Structures are given as C-alpha cells and as structure tokens.
Image (cartoon, rainbow, N blue to C red):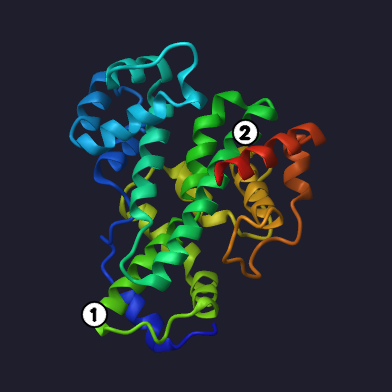
Amino acid sequence: MGFSLDLRYQICLQPIELPVFNSVALELLQLLANADAEINNMIEIINKDQALTLQILKMANSPVYAGRYKSETIKESVSRLGVAQITSLAMAASQAALHVSPVPVVNEAMHHLWLHSHACAVGCRSLAIGTGYQPLADQAYLAGLLHDIGKLYLLKALEQICLKSGTTAALDRETLLDVFSDMHVEQGYRIMHHWDIPPLYCNIVAHHHTDTFDPPDVILAMVRLINFQSRVFELDAYPRFIQPDDVLPEMGVLSVTEAVAAQVEKAMRGSCA
C-alpha cells in the first residue's frame, strides 16, 4: 500500500450510500433477478425518471439497436429489445452521468474510468456474440460495465474528502493507482452486496482479478479477458499489478479465434470514438 493509513481510514469512513447507482437503473437491475417480473413493471420503473427515459429512447433508437424500426415510447422499446437489453441501456446511460466530479483530479479519473468501463461492456458483448454465447450478451455487457464499480465508489469517497478538506494535495495519479489496487475489489463487492445486486455481478466484481477462475463461469472469463485486453489497447488509464499475467485459459475456454479477437478490438476502440 503506497498511500497513508490516514487516507485509507478517511475513505472507510465515507457512507456506503455514495451515489454509484441511479435509483431507477438500480431497480431495473434488481428486477432482472425476479423471474416473474413483467414488462409493465419495467415501464413503470423507467417512467419515474424522465431524463433517463429520454436517454434510453435515444440509445434504443441508435444505429446499434434500432434495426429497421425506431421506437416512439419506452413500451415499444421494451417490447422490441427485451427487459435485459433495456436494463443494460438504462444502466449505461445512468452510469455515464455519474462519472463527473467538481474536483478536477477526480473528474479526470472518472472520465477515464467511464471510457474503460464502457469499452469493457462493449467488448464483453461483442465477445459473447462472437464466441457463440449470444443469449448471454446482455449479461456480459452489464458485467463488463460494472466490474470496476469499486473504483467509482472510491473516487466518490475521495471527492467527498477533498470537498470537506478544501484541498487535493494528497491526490495524484500514483496515489489513485495505489488506492485502486489496494481497495477497489473489496469496496466494489461491499457496494454490490449492500445494494442487493444479483449474485452474477457480485461474483464478477469479487473475482475479476483473482489468479485463477472457475472454467464453467464463461461471463467471468469474458470480463477477465476483456479487462486484460483493455490494457493492451491502452483503454485503461489506471492499471496496476493485480491483473493475471495472461488470459490464455480464458481464451481457451471461450475458443476465441483471430477473427473474433479482431472484431472485439474494433468494438472496444469504437466505443471510445
């Protein structure tokens, strides 16, 4: 640990309710765990937030998702794209809005974190489709989007510390790297568990940096592989020495071909354009 015990103590004192999830998007994510959930429940939840509703419609009608027809209402979008994909869009739209800060050094880190998280989400979705796991594409997207949620929490905590103290003197890139390396997995799992996020995504947060992984868990394999590739493609501005040395086991489990790898790289780079 390269940062002070005092800073660690101050971070741990920050409330767990720091805004790392939009309340409406969080409800939608929790709804996915309910096998009896109906489309009308989803529509009712989305309509609680007009700004998010408009953003979801905009994304649903983008060239990536629109297909031959565009939706004029959330009901049409949900009917066309399904509950899982609309939840992915809602979470992405809301997460983008949360990655801003009035503290310049924190704001810059949040910007880079969003680019990394979005690139991983897009990469995981592309990888799922390319390796024959199309039914898991939306789950893979959300797993990639949320795997580093602990870093967002830590940045929100550091933002509060800076605002209360009136100084950013203790913050620089090396300090952020040390804080992320030492705390982001632990804090990420704590946040996911606190907000009752479905176990699939809690598991991703807890194990995306472990030395080994459980081969049957293909979504975890996707996140680990894509997270590794994000560094190869220079889409992670805050790496540290906690990533496994290689992802050959993950590539073997997923049977990644050169053509799929090229498509994934194109998708990830395009997400930051």
Residue in view at x 38 percent, y 71 percent: 104
Residue 126: numbered disc: 2
Q: Residues within 10 Å of mark 1 (few under 14, many from 20)?
A: few
Relative to residue 5, is residue 23 drawn left or right?
left
Q: Position of residue 37 (x, y in %)?
A: 30, 24
Q: Position of residue 24 (x, y in %)?
A: 25, 40
Q: Quadrant of the N terminus?
A: bottom right
Judge by depth and name the residue closer to the eye, 89 or 255. 89
Could you tell me if residue 85 is visible in this image?
yes
Q: Position of residue 213 (x, y in %)?
A: 66, 51
Could you tell me if residue 38 is visible in this image?
no
Q: Position of residue 65 (x, y in %)?
A: 48, 23
Q: Which residue lies most toward the top here?
A: 68
* Vertical relation: 166 (above or below) 139: below
| Residue 234 found in image quarter | bottom right
Residue 18: numbered disc: none
Give the Cα distance between marks 2 and 1: 42 Å
Judge by depth and name the residue closer to the eye, 204 or 180. 180
Q: Amino acid at mark 2?
A: Ser
Q: Amino acid at mark 1?
A: Lys
Judge by depth and name the residue closer to the eye, 52 or 217. 52
Residue 164: numbered disc: 1
Residue in view at x 49 percent, y 74 percent: 176
Label 2 close to label 1 by CB (< 8 Å): no
Q: Residues within 10 Å of mark 2 (few under 14, many from 20)?
A: many
Q: Quadrant of the C terminus?
A: top right
Residue in view at x 42 percent, y 87 percent: 5
Is label 2 in a helix, a strand or a loop? helix
Residue in view at x 30 percent, y 67 percent: 102
| Residue 126 found in image quarter | top right
Is label 1 in a helix, a strand or a loop? helix
